[in-house]
Amino acid sequence: MENNKLDEYLDYCLNRLAVEIGPRPAGSQANQTGAAFIGREMKQAGYTVLEQKYPCPDWRLLSDELLVNGRKIRAVVNTHSPAVEIEAELVPVSTADDIQEYDLTNRIAVLHGELTRTAFMPKNFDRNIYADEYKDRIIQLLEESKPGAVVLVSHEQNDMPLPLIEDSDLDLPSVTVHREEGLLLTENSGTTAKMKINTARKDSTGANIIGRWGNSKKKILLCAHYDTKHGTPGALDNASGVAALLCLAKHLKDLEIKYALELVAFGGEDSWFPGDALYTREYPPDNLVAAINLDGIGLKDVPTMMAVFGCSEKLVSRINKTAKQFGEYVQNQFYESNHGFFWPLGIPTLAFTSMESLESLGKVAHTKHDTPEVLDISLIEQTVKLAREIVEFWD
């Protein structure tokens, strides 16, 4: 594909996903529209396409309000929170002992300090990949103490905090607040607060879209997730990676490659749903010789980052040498994406992202600001070309 044609196709895919379809949380109609678009593009490129579905809810926030002493508190309703309308006493808690000691029944528990330094994993997340027994214990204690609602105080300095709980199996109404607002709440222990959350939820499905090419028993897997957090157009995270994946679909099938190609667009990475675990369970990756993940590439004015897992020194040297032909690439560690389900299994793995993609969380990624304007298509194009070369010489 010529450069101008490649740029046009990348722009087309980015616009379709991040502008026309927009936010694509797993279970939503927009997520399913995105899946259909990706499947059609793979089919048009000549791939055999499979849709691997899994159940998940379609959750929507309709309205919310948190008031303390008549003052409206900036709050983000945690994804999948059930609805609630409550007027109750604020009870700050900062340790597991606090949760056990205080009577939280039908009160509003305010979690702060070390309890909220990091997000909580949902119950359905595969603990074989990552586990935090302490945080799991906190959730268990909260369920046992039966608060009427929960407020979590963020440690981040973003304009609006990111949700600290995203769990479709947790029946606790909850919001996350900015840490400055959290200070007000902890200082008003015993004060009566009002919380109203209005949400809608129905049963739905998410899906992995799998495109296959070639007859070899050994495969190279290339993947990207197409879902988003709620409320973000998801251009950087991760329409960029999907656009690159679909470009590679058009590029790779015309090469003489010794391995079959397995292209997977995962449907629930940002939503914590078990698409990755389902894929590795239903299609055991014993026959994968490599896994290449594309997530958050193309952020303007920063180099592309490449993380390498389980590759030989000879292969890494060749990859680094080849990368210099296409642009500025920095080798660094990057664990938090779909490739995290492959390298622990001993599969040689590469992951591409933007150097500051993690730092952009809450500023660009996972916010309403994640639009195509934050991207440099030429950087995505460079990674498409580099990935194409890597697949061609992989041995």
Image (cartoon, helix red, strand yellow):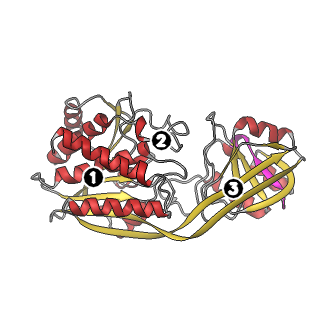
- In front: 57, or 305? 57
Residue occupied by mark 2: 370
Mark pair 3, 1: CA separation: 37 Å
Write the residue at 68% across / 57% down.
139
User: Left or right: 47 with respect to 340?
Assistant: left
Residue occupied by mark 3: 63
Is 108 included in the stretch rendered in magenta?
yes
Residue occupied by mark 1: 246
The kind of secondary structure element at disc 3 is strand
User: Left or right: 352 with respect to 177?
Assistant: left
- In front: 4, or 294? 4
As shown in the figure, which amino acid type bears the numbered disc 3? Ser
Viewer-nearest of discs 2 and 3: 3
Q: Do labels 2 and 3 touch, CB within 8 Å?
A: no
Label 2 vs 3, first from the N-terminus: 3
The kind of secondary structure element at disc 2 is loop
Is 49 included in the stretch rendered in magenta?
no
Crowding at dot 2, Cα within 10 Å, few <14 / some 14-19 / many 20+, comes out as many
Camera sees residue 238? yes
* Magenta-highlighted residues: 106-114
* Residue 136 percent location from the top left of the image: 64, 56
Mark pair 2, 3: CA separation: 23 Å
Q: Is residue 70 above or below residue 29?
A: above
The quadrant in which the N terminus is found is top left
As shown in the figure, which amino acid type bears the numbered disc 2? Asp
